[in-house]
């Protein structure tokens, strides 16, 4: 039987690559639903090609345009975030790929978990914001969560059923500013930040990689996916992005997963798990990489990594605060309203201003997110950029 897949965020970097995986294996996978936020034309084009049962556009203003674009096809068309959250519950769906960006991924992921759908998790913000809640729900509803993030897929591929993990070693590219001094970091532009050395990704995660908040988020994501303590998660900078991450076991043995930087592999592995299927494209040619290098991360120049560890240690709603503040500052940086280094300053200030909640409920997360966005936006406007 073909696996029926819902792709949340099909018009993005992960979403479009997921569709390439489906296209390569029409005998294994079928698209049940596609969703996007604004890109109606691309969504309609994808729907025409993959003929899903339903499409959802989150922005309700785009509904008529999408409905008209697909009026000759028997595809159900919906709009709005409620529809997006409901579509994941549809009976025939086996796997929900959460490839939408940001906090918006939380609610549909919760619904999909409650509906017992296997989660192929690309949206790391879900676990950053509410890792404990998500894990509790996944246990309660016996729902598997399979990592798509390249580092976490690598770790997942290295795990051994019989042997506990001693340490997780997350590799980081270091981003485009890896070698810059603090002084040089003061004046970097969004155009420079958007040029990741190894990966073509959406704008938000690319800025997060440049500021190393992406790695901080991945540390938090690793805690919830693999049940390890913060002191068991180490970050090492590996500029070539060939080793996607490593696991150290009790006896000191270290296992790594290597490959060319290509997100289709972790996406496909989450779809095909526990099997491996053929994947077209470039293979690792060791002769091309005469040196693989490693260095310790610098949390003075890349303060976000330290802030994420701090949030992980504090727990409660603190990672939610960091996530919301980060979404605000990244958006401001992309609009040239905030400088690169000021992003960390706003996040740190927000961490000290938003009320801390040790054991948050879902509603607490919703309120924390809203309150942090309000405070961070004020900080951006009122002087943090001076
Ligand atoms: N790109 C990568 O290689 C990797 C990405 N990830 C994670 O995967 C997720 C997606 O990243 P990426 O594909 O790069 O992001 P993109 O920006 O390329 O794509 C985001 C997708 O989400 C949709 N979307 C955006 N906002 C909303 C919203 N409010 N409601 C519903 N849909 C929305 C977009 O729709 P539209 O196009 O219409 O705006 C688009 O389809 C992120 O959480 C990221 O951290 C993790 C590892 C690697
Ligand atoms: C492809 C992927 O998983 C990204 O999260 C990538 O790892 C970003 O690279 P860095 O954050 O290491 O620069
Ligand atoms: Mn990653």
Image (cartoon, rainbow, N blue to C red):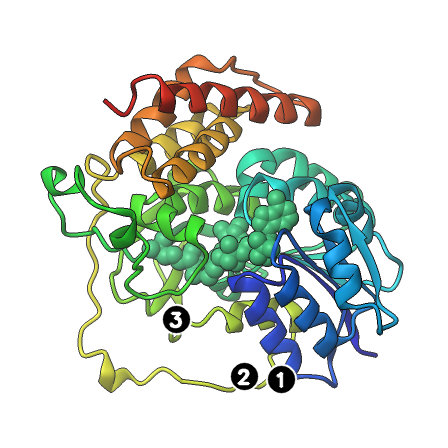
Relative to 269, say whether 127 is above or below: above
Instruction: Give the CA separation, mark 3 to mark 1.
Output: 19 Å
Q: Which residue is mark 1?
A: 24
Q: Nearer the viewer, residue 75 or 107?
A: 75
- Name the spot of residue 84 as percent of width and height, x first: 75, 49
Q: Position of residue 217 (x, y in %)?
A: 44, 42
- Classify 10 Å Cα crowding around label 2: few (below 14), some (14-19), many (20 and above): some
Mark found first going from the N terminus, 3 or 2: 3
Disc 3: which residue: 261
Residue at 51% from the left image edge and 45% from the top image edge: 221
Question: Disc 3 or 1, which lies upstream in sequence?
Answer: 1
Q: Is mark 3 within 8 Å of ligand 2?
A: yes
- Secondary structure beneath disc 1? helix
Q: Quadrant of residue 140?
A: top right
Q: Residue at x 54, y 83 (%)?
A: 279
Cα distance in 3D space between marks 3 and 2: 13 Å
Along the line of sight, which residue is nearer the eye, 148 or 321?
Answer: 321
| In the depicted structure, whether residue 63 falls above or below residue 353 | below
Q: Nearer the viewer, residue 183 or 145?
A: 183
Helix, strand or loop for disc 2: loop
> Looking at the image, do the residues carrying marks 1 and 2 touch, with CB atoms under 8 Å apart?
yes
Expressed as whole percent of the image width and height from the top left, the position of residue 229 reads 46, 38
Would the CB of label 2 be found within 8 Å of ligand 1? no
Q: Is residue 152 visible?
A: no
Which residue is disc 2 drawn over? 279
């Amino acid at each position: 039987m073909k696996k029926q897949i819902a792709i949340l965020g099909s018009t993005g970097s992960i979403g479009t690559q997921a569709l390439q995986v489906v296209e390569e294996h029409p005998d294994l996978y079928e698209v049940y639903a596609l969703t996007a936020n604004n890109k109606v034309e691309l969504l309609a084009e994808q729907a025409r090609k993959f003929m899903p049962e339903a499409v959802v556009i989150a922005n309700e203003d785009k509904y008529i345009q999408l409905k008209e674009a697909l009026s000759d096809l028997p595809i159900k068309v919906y709009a709005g975030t409620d529809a997006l959250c409901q579509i994941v519950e549809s009976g025939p769906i086996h796997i929900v790929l959460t490839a939408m960006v940001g906090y918006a991924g939380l609610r549909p992921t919760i619904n999909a978990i409650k509906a017992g759908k296997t989660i192929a998790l690309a949206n790391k913000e879900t676990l950053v914001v509410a890792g404990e809640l998500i894990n509790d729900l996944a246990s309660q509803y016996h729902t598997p969560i399979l990592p798509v993030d390249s580092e976490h897929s690598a770790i997942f591929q290295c795990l051994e059923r019989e042997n506990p993990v001693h340490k997780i070693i997350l590799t980081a590219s270091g981003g485009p500013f890896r070698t810059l001094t603090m002084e040089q970091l003061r004046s970097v532009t969004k155009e420079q930040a958007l040029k990741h050395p190894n990966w073509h990704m959406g704008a938000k995660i690319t800025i997060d990689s440049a500021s190393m908040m992406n790695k901080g988020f991945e540390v938090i994501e690793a805690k919830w996916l693999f049940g390890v303590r913060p002191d068991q998660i180490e970050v090492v900078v590996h500029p070539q992005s060939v080793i996607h991450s490593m696991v150290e076991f009790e006896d000191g043995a270290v296992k790594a997963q290597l490959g060319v930087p290509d997100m289709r592999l972790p996406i496909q592995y989450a779809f095909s798990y526990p099997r491996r299927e053929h994947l077209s494209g470039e293979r690792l040619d060791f002769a091309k990489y005469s040196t693989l290098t490693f260095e310790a991360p610098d949390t003075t120049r890349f303060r976000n990594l330290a802030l994420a560890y701090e949030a992980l240690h504090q727990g409660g709603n603190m990672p939610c605060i960091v996530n919301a503040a980060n979404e605000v500052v990244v958006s401001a940086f992309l609009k040239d309203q905030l400088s690169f280094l000021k992003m960390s300053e706003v996040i740190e200030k927000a961490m000290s201003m938003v009320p801390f909640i040790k054991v948050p409920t879902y509603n607490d997360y919703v309120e924390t997110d809203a309150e942090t966005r309000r405070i961070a936006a004020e900080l951006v406007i009122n002087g943090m950029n001076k």
